[in-house]
């Protein structure tokens, strides 16, 4: 199946090189040079995925992302950014981006992230059926019992007592005071609905389905992105930090915990 990509990049050499590489990889590419053209093309072409530079004249990539999300456009967006500070990356996630690549980048990394976003989109479109056939990261762990076999998932069992998620036949996962509706891609903590990006939702669902079990970094990368970016990557830490800001608000009991040198776990302490 040929997927369509909208590429918005104002740097002509980068835009030309990416357009050529994506076309050779089998994508149908629409390439534009600024944010205004990007919005027009997104409305006209309805691409499968958007590759969006942050720094563009006029309307920048963050504004394009915000407009599309305000229009309820859920097309997956991969941001290209030369900004390496955590605050800058968080700004992209807050605008509604699903993932980001820092310049300079290897084109193979761009391909890997695009494939992961497209797999997740396909799995999400399948709803509950996608969760049953193991076809994407939404199936990660498939439930607490599945993650208790380290040979299958790479997960590390948490010592300190059983703490399990409750998974209903409807696809709703409950852990502590979290309720996550997989088919509708909505989540609540108590009575408060959480406004989550696609990646944040899938990360929270993965942790909740494996509540009480420490998931190592490589397992999370594999389940969410379909690609392990290695020990030097801060990608996961940025996403976990931003997810905490939405889930573990002041006054609430923290649920997402770091196990130093291993990974992350969702549990009530």
Image (spheres, helix red, strand yellow):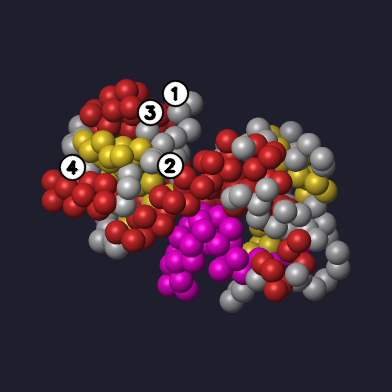
Can you say which quadrant of the picture contains the N terminus?
Answer: top left
Q: Mark 4 points at which residue?
A: 10
Q: Give the range drawn in magenta.
A: 212-241
For label 2, the crowd category at 10 Å Cα-Cα, with few meaning under 14, some 14 to 19 and many 20 or more, is few
In the structure shown, which secondary structural element does the residue marked by tag 1 occupy?
A: loop
Is residue 55 one of those drawn in magenta?
A: no
Label 1 – label 2 distance at C-alpha:
27 Å
Q: Residue furthest front?
A: 1
Which label number is shown at residue 46?
3
Label 3 – label 4 distance at C-alpha:
20 Å
Q: How many labels does the image show?
A: 4
Q: Residue furthest left?
A: 12
Label 3 – label 2 distance at C-alpha:
16 Å
Q: Name the residue under label 1.
A: 71
- Horizontal side, residue 126 vs residue 82: left or right: right
Q: Which residue lies furthest to the bottom in this view?
A: 261
Q: Nearer the viewer, mark 2 or mark 4?
A: 2
Residue 66, located in which quarter of the rendered image?
Answer: top left
The residue located at (60%, 66%) in the rendering is 219
Label 1 – label 4 distance at C-alpha:
24 Å
Considering only order in the chain, which callout, 4 or 1, is on the residue closer to the N terminus?
Answer: 4
Residue 180, located in which quarter of the rendered image?
Answer: top right
Does the rendering let one see residue 160? Answer: yes
């Amino acid at each position: 199946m040929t997927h369509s990509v909208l590429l918005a990049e104002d740097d002509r050499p980068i835009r030309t090189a990416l357009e050529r590489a994506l076309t050779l990889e089998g994508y149908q590419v629409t390439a534009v040079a600024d944010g205004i053209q990007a919005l027009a093309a997104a409305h006209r072409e309805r691409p499968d995925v958007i590759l969006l530079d942050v720094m563009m004249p006029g309307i920048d990539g963050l504004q394009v992302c915000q407009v599309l999300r305000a229009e309820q456009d859920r097309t997956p967006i991969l941001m290209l950014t030369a900004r390496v500070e955590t605050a800058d990356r968080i700004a992209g996630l807050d605008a509604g981006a699903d993932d980001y690549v820092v310049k300079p980048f290897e084109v193979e990394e761009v391909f890997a992230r695009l494939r992961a976003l497209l797999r997740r989109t396909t799995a999400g479109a399948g709803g509950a059926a996608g969760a049953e056939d193991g076809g994407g990261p939404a199936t990660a762990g498939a439930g607490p019992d599945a993650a208790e076999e380290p040979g299958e998932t790479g997960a590390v069992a948490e010592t300190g007592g059983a703490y399990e998620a409750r998974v209903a036949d409807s696809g709703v996962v409950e852990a502590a005071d979290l309720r996550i509706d997989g088919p509708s891609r909505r989540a609540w903590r108590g009575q408060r609905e959480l406004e989550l990006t696609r990646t944040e939702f899938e990360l929270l669902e993965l942790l909740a389905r494996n509540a009480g079990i420490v998931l190592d970094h490589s397992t999370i990368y594999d389940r969410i992105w379909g690609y392990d970016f290695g020990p030097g990557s801060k990608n996961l830490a940025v996403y976990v930090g931003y997810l905490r800001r939405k889930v573990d608000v002041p006054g609430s009991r923290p649920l997402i915990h770091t196990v130093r040198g291993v990974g992350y776990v969702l549990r009530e302490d």
